[in-house]
Amino acid sequence: MNTLQAIILAIIEGITEFLPVSSTGHMIIASSFFGIAQDDFTKLFTIVIQLGTILSVIVLYFKRFFQSLDFYFKLFVAFIPAVIFGLLLSDFIDGLLENPITVAVSLIIGGFLLLKVDEWFGNSEGTEISYLTAFKIGLFQCLAMIPGVSRSGASIVGGMTQKLSRTTAAEFSFFLAIPTMLGATLKKSYDYYKDGFVLSDDQINLLIIGNVVGFIVALIAIKSFIGFLTKHGFKVFGYYRIVAGIAILFIHFFVQKLTII
């Protein structure tokens, strides 16, 4: 991975992490395009630079983190399913992270679901999150362990199924990203060193650049997304996912065939 590739991946992460379009899926496609998707450092990089994006949540919602202990308990309850399924399915998930077809199919299926989400749950106006609701949102978030599903999309829709407003569900999804991404980063870093890898000075610099770029881009993306979601709902993201998924399948099968010929 070179500096330009790191910056591009970080921009993609910053834009897509909090949108219902799957940041992991987009980074898999981008890193596959660069020919570095199967590199161990690339896999570490795409996880660790999420620290920059979660820092943007802390900065934007700083005052909300001092509201009550109850807030942290609910985040913990919502985080529990990710811990359980993440540990149980770690090897299976790593295998999926190299498969563009999984990303494409997940994008398309998720896109069709997003076209209907507003119709099914868009009229909800709830703002109170119970412990049971938090846990259910955490279960929905686990669907994003399949590349292309979208962590934010799954958890926001999960909140809306529990009669939360789009804004409340989206903001809780942002908060839930913090323990989820932090846990994923620690787990991936531990596995990386356990497998005998050591970061070089160049790789450390790439991680710093990735986190800084991801932080700046995510600041803009979060503020823009909340306003857009409140006014327009999910349909645009649904159409985007469908088109992106079809494009990936077309490139993977048709363009590869042309190259072989």
Image (tube, rainbow, N blue to C red):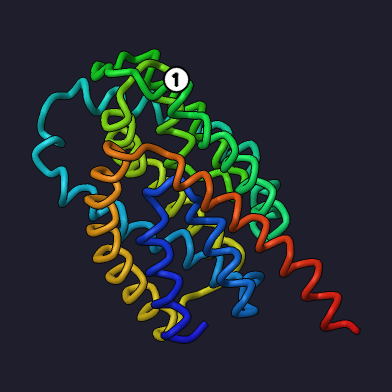
Residue 41 location, x and y as percent?
54, 72
- Where is mark 1, residue-wise? 161
Front in this rendered view, residue 235 or 225: 235
What residue is at 17 percent from the left and 24 percent from the top? 69
Q: Is residue 31 above or below residue 47?
A: below
- Element assignment for label 1: helix
Whether residue 126 sits left or right of residue 101 in the image: it is left
Residue 36 location, x and y as percent?
61, 77
Residue 254 location, x and y as percent?
80, 70
Q: How many numbered circles are shown?
A: 1
What residue is at 24 percent from the left and 48 percent from the top? 57
Front in this rendered view, residue 29 or 75: 29
Question: What is the three-letter code of the residue carrying label 1?
Answer: Thr
Whether residue 80 sits left or right of residue 245 in the image: it is left
Quadrant location of residue 149?
top right
What residue is at 41 percent from the left and 42 percent from the top? 180
What residue is at 60 percent from the left and 50 percent from the top? 242
